[in-house]
Image: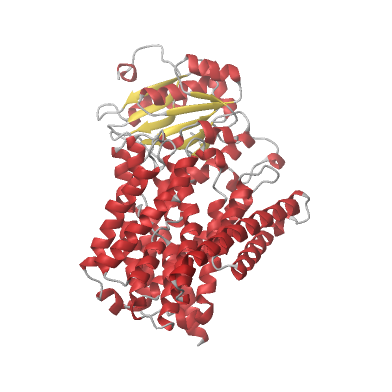
């Protein structure tokens, strides 16, 4: 028994994290591979039997895990992100939710053939979306304007709202109250959920702020204590009102994200890492509970029902929710084409199906397979098409090639100008007003701000940016900038100048800085001296007749390769670790010393 349990637990972790990694490598929605991994581990291979493995604690574990995931999502919600479009977000989680619920109910009743009570319940389950599926897609697409913020806020807030609605319908079905009492029961339950969830979430967040602000909790215990408070608040809320814990943890995250008394960066990083592990395990576990017979009983009606949610319910909900807003038709179209369902829909449907089956409802066993069809279908449709749709609408690039540059001094402007002349988007950021003014006078986009400030996130359009190069004279600023933007661009796409050589006690650890630019000795001081001596940034089109070897023959050690751009417009930034050799057909951008006579390089 012990070896079997160990093998099942190991299978969940290996398949879950492995699916996440493969999805990243293949640029696919991770939830698709997670569900396939769970389906393989459960009904096909028989490696994992969640009910036998966890028994009665399966759904409490799922419930607490979802609460922690929503807390992590709430930590990303900043009120300044939706300035001017808060009404749209509120409409989407109220009016838009009701429209989705109505169409989901009618579709389940008229198309799938469920009875009306279960149709009401299924329609309520399908109003949820969730950060576990929306946020990864937004991080991949990075849409311009306010659409990304709207979708993130909607995806996180709709989970507790939708789960609360589903719980109220579920309790009404079990209670079998008469019509006169049903409305009162629903209103009472809704008010209790809002009051308890809001109060517990806000108070627990304030307690956490005071504990950390007054240094009552040492740094090495802050993450464990925060998990303790999340679990305690979640459980206490649920004891007083079913599913109020989801709202509690969401409110906690939102309050912490918008206060300025303590730093929550370490909390968000820790919760994100826990969230990946929990999310991977949950999807594998719940997918493993599926039965082959239940899936084979589904018909074309389930596909038609899925089409109703995607092609009718979502576009209509977005259209009505955005009437009178300042959003363009392109932004509204993108909003209408992203509403995937995720872990909350799966977990709630699985729990309700189990309890309804015990209560003697014969059609309850159809809820889970139909929910998986909708989850897999929406994730597949949206995940595989959203990038192309966003690009067609002009709201995103599938692989942004723009470069964010920390530092706007004279030779940073030279590098930016060379990239801009090749059609690349660039944005210079500096705290020196003279540098910023000079860059703007030269026709280069520049912002007067610290690369480490929140102002960058508020004012800069980073949707076109895919890389950071930190060119300031301060190694610590460069390293902090690289660490910060690694969360946005990925660690492989953040670069900084090599560290100054000096006292080893002032060195920066390897994991605390980005990839080193250009060459081992090409520091800020080295580049500044080269430019003072008259070196220039030169663009060279490499051909079969004049290749990279010829370039080296002409300039030798005086030529420092900086960037190369291939025929498709993809940019490669030279570093100390990439070992790239420019090829014919590419454009080489290099730092060179001007020659006294004409050469093939000059003619090229």
In the picture, measured across the screen, residue 135 lies left or right of residue 294, that is: right
User: Can the viewer see residue 514?
Assistant: no
Considering depth in this image, is 111 or 18 the residue closer to the camera? 111
Identified at 70% across, 55% down, the residue is 208
Tally the numbered discs: 0
Identified at 30% across, 16% down, the residue is 603
Considering depth in this image, is 564 or 42 the residue closer to the camera? 42
Identified at 49% across, 69% down, the residue is 181
Asked if residue 264 is positioned above or below residue 526 in the image, the reply reads below
Instruction: Please name the colour scheme applied to the rendered image.
Output: secondary structure
- Residue at the far bottom in the pictured view: 1
Asked if residue 23 is positioned above or below residue 3 in the image, the reply reads above
Considering depth in this image, is 141 or 238 the residue closer to the camera? 238
Residue 525 x, y percent position in the rendering:
59, 26
Residue 206 x, y percent position in the rendering:
70, 52
Q: Quadrant of residue 512?
A: top right
Asked if residue 94 is positioned above or below residue 66 in the image, the reply reads above
In the picture, measured across the screen, residue 473 lies left or right of residue 358, that is: right
Asked if residue 405 is positioned above or below residue 153 in the image, the reply reads above
Residue 459 x, y percent position in the rendering:
52, 31
Residue 218 x, y percent position in the rendering:
75, 56
User: Can the viewer see residue 51?
Assistant: yes
Identified at 39% across, 71% down, the residue is 287
- Residue at the far front in the pictured view: 180
Q: Is the C terminus in the top left, top right, bottom left or bottom right quadrant?
A: top left
- Residue at the far left in the pictured view: 300
In the picture, measured across the screen, residue 568 lies left or right of residue 203, that is: left
């Amino acid at each position: 028994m012990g070896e079997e349990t160990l093998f099942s637990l190991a299978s969940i972790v290996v398949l879950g994290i492995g699916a996440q990694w493969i999805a990243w490598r293949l640029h696919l929605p991770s939830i698709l591979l997670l569900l396939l991994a769970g389906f393989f581990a459960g009904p096909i291979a028989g490696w994992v039997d969640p009910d036998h493995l966890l028994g009665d604690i399966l759904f409490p574990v799922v419930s607490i895990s979802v609460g922690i995931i929503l807390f992590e999502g709430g930590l990303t919600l900043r009120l300044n992100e939706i300035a001017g479009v808060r009404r749209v977000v509120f409409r989407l989680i109220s009016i838009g939710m009701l429209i989705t619920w109505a169409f989901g109910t009618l579709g389940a009743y008229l198309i799938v053939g469920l009875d009306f009570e279960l149709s009401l319940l299924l329609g309520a389950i399908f109003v949820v979306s969730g950060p576990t599926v929306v946020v990864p897609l937004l991080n991949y697409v990075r849409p311009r304007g306010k659409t990304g913020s709207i979708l993130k806020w909607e995806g996180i807030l709709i989970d507790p709202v939708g789960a609360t609605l589903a719980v109220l319908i579920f309790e009404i079905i079990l209670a079998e109250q008469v019509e006169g009492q049903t409305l009162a029961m629903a209103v009472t339950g809704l008010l209790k959920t809002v009051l308890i969830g809001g109060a517990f979430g806000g108070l627990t967040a304030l307690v956490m702020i005071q504990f950390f602000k007054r240094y009552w909790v040492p740094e090495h215990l802050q993450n464990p204590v925060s998990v303790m408070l999340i679990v305690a608040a979640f459980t206490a809320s649920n004891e007083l009102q079913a599913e109020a814990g989801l709202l509690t943890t969401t409110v906690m995250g939102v309050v912490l994200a918008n206060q300025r008394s303590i730093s929550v960066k370490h909390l968000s990083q820790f919760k994100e890492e826990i969230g990946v592990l929990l999310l991977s395990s949950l999807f594998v576990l719940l997918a493993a509970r599926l039965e082959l017979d239940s899936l084979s009983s589904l018909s074309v009606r389930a596909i038609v029902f899925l089409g109703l949610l995607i092609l009718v319910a979502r576009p209509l909900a977005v259209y009505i929710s955005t009437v009178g807003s300042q959003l363009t038709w392109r932004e509204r179209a993108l909003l209408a084409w992203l509403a995937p369902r995720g872990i909350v829909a799966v977990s709630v449907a699985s729990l309700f199906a189990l309890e309804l089956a015990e209560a003697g409802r014969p059609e309850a066993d159809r809820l889970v397979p139909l929910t998986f069809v909708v989850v897999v279908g929406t994730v597949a449709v949206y995940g595989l098409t959203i990038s192309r749709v966003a690009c067609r609408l002009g709201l995103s690039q599938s692989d942004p090639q723009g470069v964010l540059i920390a530092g706007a001094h004279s030779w940073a402007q030279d590098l930016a100008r060379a990239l801009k002349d090749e059609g690349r988007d660039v944005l210079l950021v500096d705290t020196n007003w003279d540098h910023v003014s000079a860059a703007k006078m030269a026709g280069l986009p520049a912002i007067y701000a610290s690369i480490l400030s929140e102002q960058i996130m508020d004012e800069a359009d980073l949707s076109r940016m895919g890389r950071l190069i930190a060119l300031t004279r301060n190694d610590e600023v460069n390293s902090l900038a690289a660490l910060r933007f690694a969360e946005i661009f990925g660690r492989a796409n953040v670069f900084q100048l090599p560290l100054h050589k000096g006292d080893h006690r002032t060195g920066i650890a390897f994991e605390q800085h980005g990839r080193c630019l250009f060459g081992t000795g090409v520091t800020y001081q080295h580049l500044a001296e080269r430019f003072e001596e008259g070196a220039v940034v030169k663009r060279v089109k490499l051909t079969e007749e004049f290749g990279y070897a010829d370039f080296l023959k002409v300039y030798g050690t005086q030529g420092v390769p900086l960037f190369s751009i291939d025929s498709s417009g993809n940019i490669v930034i030279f570093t100390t670790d990439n070992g790239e050799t420019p090829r014919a057909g590419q454009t080489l951008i290099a730092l060179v010393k001007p020659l006294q006579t004409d050469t093939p390089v000059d003619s090229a």
